[in-house]
Structure formats: structure tokens, C-alpha cells
Image: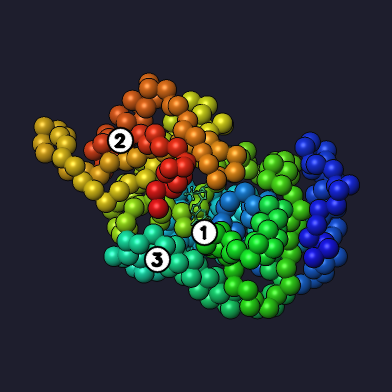
Amino acid sequence: MANNVRPESMERITTPALAQAFIEEQIAEIRAQVGDKKVLLALSGGVDSSVVAALLIKAIGKQLVCVHVNHGLMRKGESEDVIRIFGEEMDANLVYVDATDRFLNLLAGVSDPEKKRKIIGAEFINVFDEESAKLSGISFLAQGTIYPDILESIKAAESGKPVKSHHNVGGLPEDMKMDLVEPIKLLFKDEVRVVGEALGLPHGMVYRQPFPGPGLGVRCLGAITRDRLHALREADAILREEFANSGLAEHVWQYFIAVPDVKSVGVRNEMRYEGWPAIIRAVNTTDAMSATIEEIPYALLHRITDRITHEVEGINRVLYDLTPKPIGTIEWE
Ligand code: XMP
């Protein structure tokens, strides 16, 4: 446990120079720990796993094997970004697994949010296990654990209360017989970002908004269908693009679209057009325990509505969710 405690003397990493010093120190530590052995990493493309990947690529190059599981619930372009940035630009040893059909087949007809989460979490482990079984000579498992995760587990252990179920989604099996490499486990999120930029990762990846492990699976409300999931992904991409262009993406904590399994009547090309509503959620928070609503300018709301209803097949209305947390949770499921 001792090396899971951040020493009081540890300086907060706030500048590129401090990040560089941290990177060099970690490269030496990783090389000493790993030697000439191989390390496996589940690379989601989120900030933490991406920073760990970039650090390990610097330290041990092709001895790192990254596995990116596309569960079919990623946002538009995300898996492609992982392939381009890590597979091509950083020339990493990257195994890409498109498991879309497996996940969507298992989820077909399942509408209960907790069941959906369990299916996605369990199948993620199955796919990852199968992929790691195909690889030989792996001695270490790298993880993007950060200091708040450690603090939370300590708190949970002390209080006897389990960590919220959703924090385990996408987690890895405890019986994996590999030693752990956790180079950013004493860092807070803001420090991880400074280190990520110093490692040359794109700004958009390092400052990306939090994205739940079950991905769009908990935003395609109720039983997921491929056509509604596609509409959700396209509408979400438009929202993200408009938020980026208007500068809102820089300061809104989390913003996304949810699409319920409800149709309403509309008119398109003078014909009756039944479609789903796209619900905009844009919230600010410091700890995700409570959240306030971002006041999106009306002109931007009009523009987003216009684009989504004209560009996305199957969507005929756009709604703006004004509910703070509590009483609503951030996600709809
Ligand atoms: P709620 O909806 O509980 O969300 O207000 C709080 C934060 O947690 C994220 N979230 C999840 N993250 N797996 C995750 O990894 C999940 O199943 C999950 N559900 C919610 C949510 O996006 C928000 O940031």
C-alpha cells in the first residue's frame, strides 16, 4: 500500500517542464520494472489509458501491446483516432478488435440500464481475455489507474461500501495473473493532462470530456437498435462539432445527445415523417455528484436543431434537457 500513497513532498505537475521531469523518471522506472518483457494495455482512447500508452511507447516501444476493443458504442471517429494516433503516428504494437456485432447481438432486446451495463462490462472482459490469450509471453498488465481511483477504493474499503457499480464497468478481471504497471497512479486528472500534452498527444484527446465505459450504450435509451444508435452517433457528432466551433467545448464539463425509444410525428418534404427526438444534455460539475446546466445560447441551439433534424436520418425533433443533478442524473440511464 505504501507506494499507493502520494508523498506530501510530491510537487503538483502544472508545467511542461515538471511534466517532462515526471516522464523521464517514469521511463526509467518502467524500464527497470519491465526489463525485456512484454506489457499488455487495454487502450480505450480515453485520457488515462492514452497517456499510459504514450508513456510506455516512449519507454519500451514494441514491448507494449495495446488492445483496443471497439464495442460498437464508441462515438463517431473515436476508434479511427486510436488507430491513427497510436497505430500509425506512434507506430505502436496495436491490436484492433471490432467486436460491434458481439456486443449489439447480446444487447438486442435488453432495455434495463443496469443489465445493459453488466452485459457490456462482462463482454468487454471476455473479448479482452480472448485477445490476450492469443498473445504469448505477456508478463505485465498496464493500467490507467489515477490517484482519485486509489482514494476512492481506500474510502470504499474503510466504509465497507462498494464502489458504484459503474466505476467497474470495463474493469479487468481480478484473477489476471500479471504484475501491474501503473505509471500515473499518483497523479490527479489535471496533472495527467499536462503530462499527456508533454507526451505530444493531441489537445482534443487530452482534454476530452469524460465518456462512460458503456459508451453510447447508455445514451441509446432502452433496447438498443442499430438504426437508432446510428442516429444518436451522428447527432452527437454534430453537437460536438458545434460546441467545438463555438468555444463551448473548452468549458462545458460534459455534453452529449441521448435518444429515447419514442417516436413522434413530424413533416419532411411535405410528407409525414416519424422520428425520434435527440435530447441535448450539457452540464457542469466538479465531482459528478451534482451538476448544473450550461446555458447554451439560443442561436446555437437553433443551429444544432436545424443541422440535426436535416442531416440525421430518423431524428425529427431536438429537445434541451434543463434538469440539474439532483434531481436528474447526468446520464439518462
Ligand atoms: P450520473 O449519470 O451517475 O453520471 O450522474 C455521473 C458521471 O459518471 C458517468 N457514468 C459512467 N461512467 N460507466 C462509466 O464509466 C458507467 O456506467 C457510467 N454511468 C455514468 C457519467 O457519464 C458522468 O460523467
* Residue 143 appearing in the image: no
Q: Which mark is residue 318?
A: 2
Q: Is mark 3 within 8 Å of ligand 1?
A: no
Q: How far apart in space, not on screen, are marks 2 and 3 (Cα)?
A: 28 Å
Of the numbered discs 1 and 2, the one sitting upstream in the chain is 1
Q: SS at mark 1? A: helix
In the image, residue 233 lies at what x, y percent? 38, 47
Q: Residue drawn at (27%, 41%), measured in percent from left and top?
A: 277
Q: Which mark is residue 294?
A: none
In the image, residue 302 lies at what x, y percent? 33, 25
In the image, residue 243 lies at what x, y percent? 47, 31
Relative to 83, is 175 above or below? Answer: below
In this view, the residue in front, 156 or 235, is 156
Q: SS at mark 3? A: helix
Q: Mark 1 Cα within 10 Å, few/some/many (few <14, many 20+)?
A: some
Q: Mark 3 Cα within 10 Å, few/some/many (few <14, many 20+)?
A: few
Q: Mark 2 Cα within 10 Å, few/some/many (few <14, many 20+)?
A: many
In this view, the residue in front, 87 or 212, is 212
Quadrant placement of the N terminus: bottom right
Tell me, yes or no, whether the two marked residues, 1 and 2, touch with CB atoms within 8 Å: no
The residue identified by callout 1 is 166
The residue identified by callout 3 is 115
Q: Type of residue at label 1?
A: His
Q: Quadrant of residue 314?
A: top left
